[in-house]
């Protein structure tokens, strides 16, 4: 019998067996009941761990009734919902067989609006939405992703939204707000307040990601503070002071003061991502970022700032965005900054600030991504000189940087100042035979660079290299240039985070971003 039990175990894939061993006691390792029960737990968790109703299709709707079972409902850990999906589901029920996909024709839109005018909010709240509401009330998820955008131009907007807010948004906070650990909110400005308006204390929240969506027809809409002027501070005041990750993303001109003023209250932030278009009003405010970097950034490990200073003219307005350079950030490991191609007169100021920042981090910084300021050869020497000594140089492992031109002199500077980096990414602006020189013919550039590299005989233990022209995208990947490096640096084993052989469909920018644990 024992032999039969052991043979049953042997038929289980080894990876699954390792998971089973973690779920059962050591003295039960030969119990078929224990093994089958553990297998059942693994299968059920993998099937129901994520509840995705961003697409409320027939398959999703058919699965929802199963979650009325408390034993299944407790397995859901990540809930994703979409206002658009729920709205479309309601519109389908209203239109019936005459339903058509967006964009609607004028005649169809007229029929829809007439039907909506004859319906009360109670009637609009159809059986599917009631079911979703019932299921949400049973959940205790720890991760919640909500994307709240709506189809504009139809009279369903406010009727449906009021129903959904009561049945979905308000209910989620009551159901699992106090146990939530990760929150992702994406919303158009007019709906942002509805998503976050609640009195529930988010006492367990560890990660907060805010994304203000841009409507295609409106490029100058209000920012977060204008959308809920009184609720921004209220919302953040209910967030766990021990928050360790904060991400704010917006492609419009938004006023971040209501968020920045709350930053100093979060003493445990380890990851801060700011990808926003800012103007001088944000940069001139000394109470936000400066206060945070001065006293609350001791545990910061990952900092990503994409600050496009399109409205900035004077250098003093950009200083506060780099106030971190005057603070001590002893634990910073990953730094990503994109200045959005600032005005030329700002370059010296920004580079000075960065140099000071590098000196402050010293031995902890192992990944740097610096874009938006194409460096001259002199600037490259100055910025990287901080890492030329043993302690700081040993720590730095990964580097992506923008430069004006790419020549053998640039390679020599990097090999000398950052000799221990393993992964290198270069974005260069123009072909030239000499550093920061005039534009050269692209057809002759590769031959010239190859001859220079072979002649110099630079010693460097580089493992992976990526080169892009003008910007960091898949389409601008220069496989013809990275292929020159293995002959000169035998330690190079990969291009763009992949094997040295050029793939059929290169995904260079994505691959390198994954290696650097950042975004493209």
Image (cartoon, grey):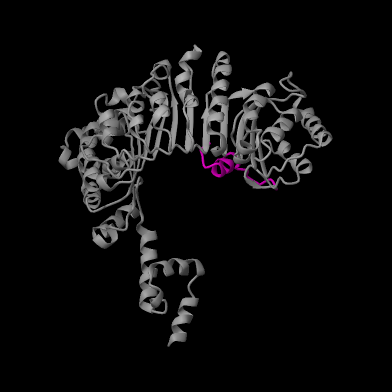
* Residue 218 position within the rendered picture, expressed as x and y whole percent measured from the top left: 38, 23
The residue that appears at 54% across and 44% down in the rendered structure is 514
Left or right relative to 5: residue 86: left
Left or right relative to 487: residue 253: left
Q: Residue furthest bottom?
A: 1
The quarter in which the N terminus is drawn is bottom left
Most foreground residue, 390 or 10: 390
Left or right relative to 452: residue 519: left
> Per the image, is 18 magenta?
no
Specify the segment rendered in magenta.
Answer: 501-520
The answer to whether residue 111 is visible is no
Q: Quadrant of residue 403?
A: top right
Q: Quadrant of residue 33?
A: bottom left
* Residue 293 position within the rendered picture, expressed as x and y whole percent measured from the top left: 43, 28
* Residue 398 position within the rendered picture, expressed as x and y whole percent measured from the top left: 60, 39
Q: Quadrant of residue 233?
A: top left
Q: Residue furthest top?
A: 314
Most foreground residue, 395 or 76: 395
SS assignment for the magenta stretch, majority: loop
Task: Answer above or below: position of 464 versus 416.
Answer: below
Most foreground residue, 467 or 478: 467
Task: Answer above or below: position of 109 versus 168.
Answer: above
* Residue 335 position within the rendered picture, expressed as x and y whole percent measured from the top left: 52, 34
> Per the image, is 518 magenta?
yes
């Amino acid at each position: 019998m024992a032999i039969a039990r052991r043979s049953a175990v042997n038929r289980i894939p080894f990876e699954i067996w390792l998971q089973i061993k973690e779920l059962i006691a050591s003295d039960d390792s030969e119990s078929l009941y224990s093994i089958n029960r553990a297998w059942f737990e693994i299968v059920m968790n993998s099937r129901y761990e994520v509840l995705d109703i961003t697409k409320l299709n027939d398959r999703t709707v058919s699965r929802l009734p199963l979650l009325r079972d408390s034993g299944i409902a407790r397995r859901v850990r990540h809930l994703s919902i979409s206002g658009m999906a729920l709205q479309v589901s309601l519109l389908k029920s209203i239109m019936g067989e005459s339903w058509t996909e967006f964009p609607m024709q004028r005649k169809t839109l007229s029929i829809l609006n007439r039907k909506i005018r004859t319906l009360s909010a109670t009637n609009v709240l159809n059986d599917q939405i009631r079911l979703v509401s019932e299921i949400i009330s049973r959940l205790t998820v720890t991760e919640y992703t909500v994307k709240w955008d709506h189809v504009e131009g139809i009279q369903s907007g406010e009727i449906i939204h009021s129903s959904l807010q009561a049945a979905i948004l308000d209910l989620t906070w009551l159901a699992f707000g106090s146990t939530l650990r990760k929150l992702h909110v994406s919303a158009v400005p007019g709906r942002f307040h509805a998503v976050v308006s609640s009195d529930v204390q988010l006492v367990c929240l560890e990660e907060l990601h805010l994304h203000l969506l841009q409507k295609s027809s409106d490029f100058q809409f209000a920012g977060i503070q204008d959308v809920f002027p009184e609720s921004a501070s209220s919302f953040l005041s209910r967030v766990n002071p021990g928050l360790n990750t904060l991400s704010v993303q917006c492609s419009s001109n938004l006023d971040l003061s209501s968020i920045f003023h709350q930053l100093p209250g979060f003493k445990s932030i380890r990851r801060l991502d700011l990808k926003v278009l800012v103007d001088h009003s944000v940069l001139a405010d000394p109470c936000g970022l400066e206060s945070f970097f001065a006293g609350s950034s001791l545990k910061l490990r990952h900092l990503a700032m994409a600050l496009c200073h399109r409205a900035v003219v004077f250098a003093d307005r950009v200083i506060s965005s780099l106030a971190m350079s005057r603070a001590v950030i002893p634990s910073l490991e990953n730094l990503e900054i994109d200045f959005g191609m600032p005005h030329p007169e700002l370059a010296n100021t920004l580079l000075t600030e960065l140099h000071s920042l590098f000196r402050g981090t010293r031995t902890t910084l192992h990944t740097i991504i610096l874009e938006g300021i194409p460096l001259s050869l002199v600037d490259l020497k100055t910025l990287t000189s901080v890492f030329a000594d043993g302690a700081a140089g040993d720590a730095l492992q990964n580097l992506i940087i923008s430069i004006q031109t790419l020549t053998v002199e640039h390679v020599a500077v990097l090999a000398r100042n950052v000799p221990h980096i393993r992964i290198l990414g270069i974005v260069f602006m123009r072909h030239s035979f000499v550093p920061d020189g005039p534009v050269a013919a692209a057809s002759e550039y590769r031959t010239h660079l190859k001859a220079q590299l072979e002649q110099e005989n630079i010693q460097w233990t580089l493992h992976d290299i990526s080169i892009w022209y003008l910007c960091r995208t898949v389409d601008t990947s220069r496989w013809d240039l990275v292929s020159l490096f293995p002959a000169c640096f035998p330690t190079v084993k990969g291009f763009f985070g992949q094997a040295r052989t050029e793939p059929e469909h290169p995904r260079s920018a994505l691959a390198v971003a994954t290696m650097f644990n950042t975004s493209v």
